[in-house]
Image (cartoon, rainbow, N blue to C red):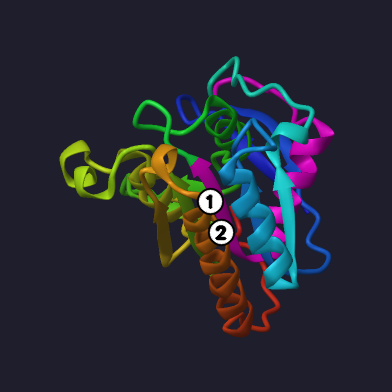
Amino acid sequence: MSKILVDPGNAQIVGTVKINLGGTMSALVIDGHPNPDSLTAALARRYTDAHGDARLLALRELDFDPVSHFGYRGDQPLEPDLADALDAVFAADRIVVTTPTWWASTPALLKGFFDRILLPKVTYRYRANGLPEGLLAGRTGRVIITSDTPRWLLPFTGDTAAKQVAANTLSFCGIRPVRTMRFTNVRHASEAARTGWLERVAKTAERDRASAPVTTREPATA
């Protein structure tokens, strides 16, 4: 299937994205950390292994330009790795994102990935009344986020990275509900604490798999 990308500023067609609708998977785990030796990456691997029907997508291993050079006003074809990632998003029933908190946000790698694949008329659109409509409806989400900030400080900092990914990105595209797991004060965490976090993520993955629906889904028509 092909979806037409439209310049939201002047409604000119700027390109197409072909989406493979063959097959589904229970969960897609998106690891947004550039470092494979990080706690974030370990949590992503542990969730994937414990889930049993999940695909791990480590963004650091993909070959793509994270810069959207024209915004959404020009044609920037998706690299093969991004096209495959977009196929995986549409095939999944649950989208899981693991990310650290850097400067009250996410790593540029993850932000650039979202900029490139979450395209208008593909993953969201605007109705005639100007309100957004997510085209990834029918999927649920989970955000696993790490930070050096202590948990008690989050209400004062705004918990901005979690809100950016869960509410302003996944939910905006129609993925609901999105549940958030936070692992805080990482720099002072003991090995025992980290091991406990990995086991907590594993148990969550097992519960997610047990509650996964059996679905045959067609994406919304743009």
Q: Residue furthest left?
A: 156
Q: Residue at x 44, y 65 (%)?
A: 176
Is residue 85 shown in magenta? yes
Q: Tags 2 and 1 in contact by the CB under 8 Å rule?
A: yes
User: In which image quadrant can residue 70 be found?
Assistant: top right
Is residue 76 shown in magenta? yes
Magenta highlight range = 72-99
Pointer 1 local density, CA inside 10 Å: few below 14, some 14–19, many at least 20 = few
Q: Residue at x 53, y 21 (%)?
A: 71
Residue 191 is marked as 1
Left/right placement of residue 127 relative to residue 36 reads left
In this view, 7 is above or below 48: above
Give coordinates of residue 46: x percent, y percent: 66, 60
Q: Secondary structure at mark 2?
A: helix
Q: Looking at the rendering, in which quadrant would you find the N terminus?
A: bottom right
Q: Residue at x 57, y 83 (%)?
A: 211
Give coordinates of residue 207: x percent, y percent: 56, 80
Give coordinates of residue 214: x percent, y percent: 68, 84
Give coordinates of residue 132: x percent, y percent: 38, 49
Pointer 2 local density, CA inside 10 Å: few below 14, some 14–19, many at least 20 = few
The residue to which callout 2 is attached is 195
